[in-house]
Amino acid sequence: MDQGAKRPKTALLQVRLTAEEHDAFKGFCAQVNLSPSEVMRRFVRQAVFMGPTFEGDARAEIVALTRQLRALGTNLNQAVRHMNAGHVIGSDDVAEWLATARGLIMELTALYRSLCARSQERAARAISRTAE
């Protein structure tokens, strides 16, 4: 699914190309099965270091890890409310929660870096194939 479809697009960018560049670009869009607008958005996002657009399994992995991280945040908020109400929380429980949170953050960071690298490699391969 095109994740860009959820965000309003209000800025317009016009680009002039030679006929040869235009044909090659259209061929690239057809090859990757994306609209020219979506391809340009993805190129721009990568060019300005906003990261790739994730879809399929990669997106599912990020969503799952984000849910886990959100659940940990909810647990932390509950623990803080509990402590603010004057209840004692064992240091072992807090240490376990922090270790779990750290592990999830590290896993999410590693996954994101890996997915970004793979996305850049795929884009470079796709561009070089169409340039041949």
Image: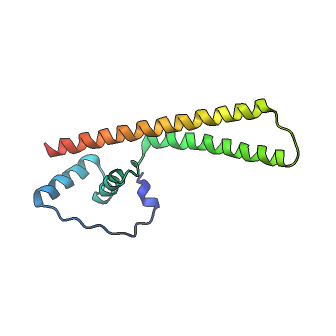
Residue depicted at x 80% and y 49%: 81
Residue depicted at x 76% and y 32%: 93
Instruction: Report whether 60 appears left or right of 12.
Output: right
26 or 84: nearer the viewer:
84
Residue farthest along the right direction in this orientation:
86
Image location (x, y in percent) of residue 65: 56, 39
Image location (x, y in percent) of residue 67: 60, 43
Image location (x, y in percent) of residue 114: 42, 36
Vertical placement of residue 20 versus 8, above or below: above
46 or 24: nearer the viewer:
46
Residue depicted at x 67% and y 41%: 72
Instruction: Report whether 121 appears left or right of 106.
Output: left
Residue depicted at x 87% and y 42%: 87
Vertical placement of residue 94 versus 70, above or below: above
Which picture quadrant has residue 82? top right
Image location (x, y in percent) of residue 95: 72, 32
Which picture quadrant has residue 19? bottom left
